[in-house]
Image (tube, grey):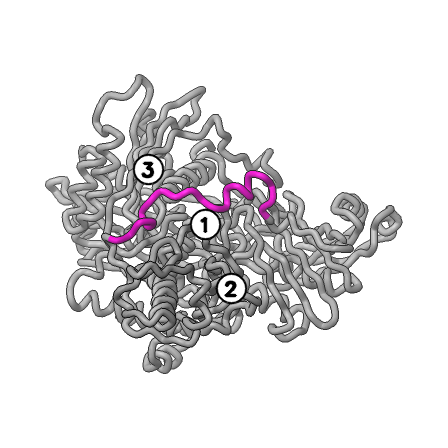
Amino acid sequence: MKRRNLILSGLGVTGALIVGWGVLPARSRLGNPSNMLPIEGEVALNGWIKIAKEGGVVLAMHRSDMGQGIHNALSMLVAEELDVPLKHIRLEQAGHDSIYGNVAMFVGTLPFHPLQSEGVNKAFVVHSGEWIVGKVARELGVNATGGSSSVKDAWEHLRIAAATAKASLMLSAADQWKVPLQELKVKEGVISHASGKSAHFGEFAKGAAALTPQNVALKDRKDWTLIGQATARADVPAKTDGSAVFGMDVRLPNMVFASVVQAPQMGGTLISLDVKEALALPGVLKCIQLNSAAGSAPGFAVLAKTTWHAKQAANKVKAQWAQRAEGAIDTKRIESELIEKLKAEKGFTFYEHGDASKAESSAARLIEAQYKAPYLAHATMEPMNCTAHLKGGSLEIWAPTQVPGLARATAAKVAHLSEDKVKVNVTLLGGGFGRRLETDVVAQATQIAMAADGLPVQMVWSREEDMTHDFYRPMQVAQLTAALNAKGELESLRIKSAGDAISPRWMSRVLPALSGPFDAPDKTTAEGLFDLPYGFANQHMAHVSTRMGVPIGFWRSVGHSHNAFFSESFIDELAFETKQDPLAFRLSLLKQAPRYAAVLKLAAEKAKWGEALPAGHAHGVALHESFGSIVAQVAEVSLQAGKPRVHRVVCAIDCGTVVNPATVAQQVESSVNFALTAALFGNIDIQEGEVQQTNFSNYPLVQMAQSPVVETWIVPSTQSPEGVGEPAVPPLAPAVSNALFKLTGKRWRALPLMA
């Protein structure tokens, strides 16, 4: 328990803070009506719901939409409980109250094994940890869209907010009409009575605001008419006709534009600038030196009347840069250092069961393998951008951000303003994948706005700046060892990995108040390795945390993205070495994990595992749990001109209760193609401190013609919703790799597979 206590303490800054908050009563997330914007004709009933004069519903939207459909999903929760048509829900950006914080995301950082919820004592440890960290997260109120947690976090309190609002409206109607409450009915936003009286919600909103309903009950699952139905997304028309506003679409009167150039050497510094030639060009206003803030690199920005003018002038600036004092960063050297640390250091033990050392010492045979994964960029379709306007002592920001509250805090700090003087407008995000959990671009745009003489300024990075100044997925290596007894039976599994820890680096940039001098063990380093569902009698899972100097950040599915490749590829190796079918072998290890076995069986059944495939084709399978969801994938692969071609991916997913099955399928398809890009091509090389991949010409994406057919099969469930945006990413690489082994007899132990 000491290891887990250490991690819990790290999450709460200190053990004393955890204990202190542990005695506080649960903070309500219903909120106050004052949390919502006061607009004439609209009546707020709590911190989430307003009723418009015509009977429409206004929802405080606290999560960012980057294509995952979260605006639609959360609107469905409210429409279901209020009994209104989905088209009657209108969105309003939520404020900065702590009720909008993401509790589920923080609870998800706890490093518990998925099978630890079984048994009274183990369940107590898990539930106690979740309860304590949940309290801390409610107090912090950090509004973040990440960790595939948006629906999971909103599932209870958002439905309660809607049900409470509905109960208040019905009380108001009963009072106004002088009829018994139980005789009222609600359908499509209209309250009616058998006497013939009926009216929409807007008629009762003012009265409802003064009423406090008691014993509010949520709808019974059997009465749902919207949740669980494939529903068209409300954001598609605007994205189709071009009226949707992403960060780069923001246009303000008298707006000027900025182009940014940052130190090309990772960790480098700016020595001098010669801007004479740049300032002589038409349309150029000024050149601004940028200081490092919120993790941004030093550099400069050129301010001009158009983006084109700014970019042309930036190319004319003569800048002198210097390498970091510690010497130039090089990925080949980092890989060698990680392997050495893997051999030399014990690391932090995240999970152990039985006695792996004893099993290894008496083993008839050891099976060992070393796996590697490279740094990866996010490469969102919309490059990094931010618009800022500083005028009259107030700052307004327009940003495609996953963390509006932290962006506000960063902007206020840079501008030397109190946070109440900063307003952040969240636009749609043209891709996030974790990159927009950072606030570096907000810090830069604020610096530029401070020098823009009261003009609004839009800062847009070039694709080259975006690719070479990312917060990358960490490089990681792992050593996996299994012990076989004299009968050829598996006795133990040991996994030790090495690589940088993301969470403490991220916190030091955007949450410095919670970033201590020492790093608590970070779950993201070992997730997908320490939390396997397989029933090995003896297990030992550890990680060696490193600091290699490369800026790293959260990348879609985080540690699972590479660790699943390590673990599921090695599981396949063990099946081969013990002469067992990969599917049957996995099922034999899942006797204590029936949910996992059910998902695996469903994927195998729908893929027709074991049946004949076209000549030159092979199936590979992988099973992985992340963000609360269990995913199994079967990939059908062939070799064309010596390179992998993925024809079909059958995906089974158990993600708890499904709000919109159409969105689940979309997210699975997105995840498969995103993961396939990484598996086949993804690689960031750093030489002499400079990132070599600068655009899609040398950091390619899977093209439409290379995209496989993706089938999504959802396991029916009555459990609470779990993550959907990321869990289908991790199993793809090992499923493809395992199919390649069948085709070639060669085992790929390093990504990308095309290398």
Q: Residue furthest left?
A: 487
Q: Amino acid at mark 2?
A: Ala
Question: Label for residue 107?
Answer: none
Looking at the image, tell me whether mark 2 or mark 1 is earlier in sequence order: 1
Q: Residue at x 50, y 57 (%)?
A: 91
Indicate the position of residue 568 as horizontal and vertical percent values.
Answer: 30, 42
Q: Label 3, on which residue?
A: 712
Residue numbers of the magenta segment: 223-244
**Picture residue at 58% right of the left edge, 36% below the top:** 696
Q: Secondary structure at mark 2?
A: loop
Q: On the image, numbered disc 2 is attached to which residue?
A: 94
Is there a contact, CB below 8 Å, between mark 3 and mark 2? no
Q: Quick one: which residue is furthest to the front in this view?
A: 195
Mark 2 neighbour density, 10 Å: few (under 14) some (14–19) many (20 or more): many
Q: Position of residue 518 (x, y in %)?
A: 45, 70
Helix, strand or loop at label 1? It is helix
Residue furthest toward the top? 615
Image vertical order of residue 467 relative to residue 202, above or below: above
Alpha carbon of mark 1 to alpha carbon of mark 3: how far? 27 Å
| Amino acid type of the residue tagged 3 in the rendering | Thr
Q: Quadrant of residue 4?
A: bottom left
Q: Nearer the viewer, mark 1 or mark 3?
A: 1
Q: Nearer the viewer, residue 503 or 557?
A: 557
Closer to us: 462 or 742: 462
Q: Position of residue 536 (x, y in %)?
A: 19, 50
Q: Earlier in the sequence, mark 1 or mark 3?
A: 1
The three-letter amino acid code for the residue at tag 1 is Lys
Front in this rendered view, residue 66 or 678: 66
Q: Which of the 4 image quadrants contains residue 146?
A: bottom left
Q: 404 left or right of 140?
A: right
- Which residue is the site of mark 1? 87
Of 203 and 752, nearer the camera is 203
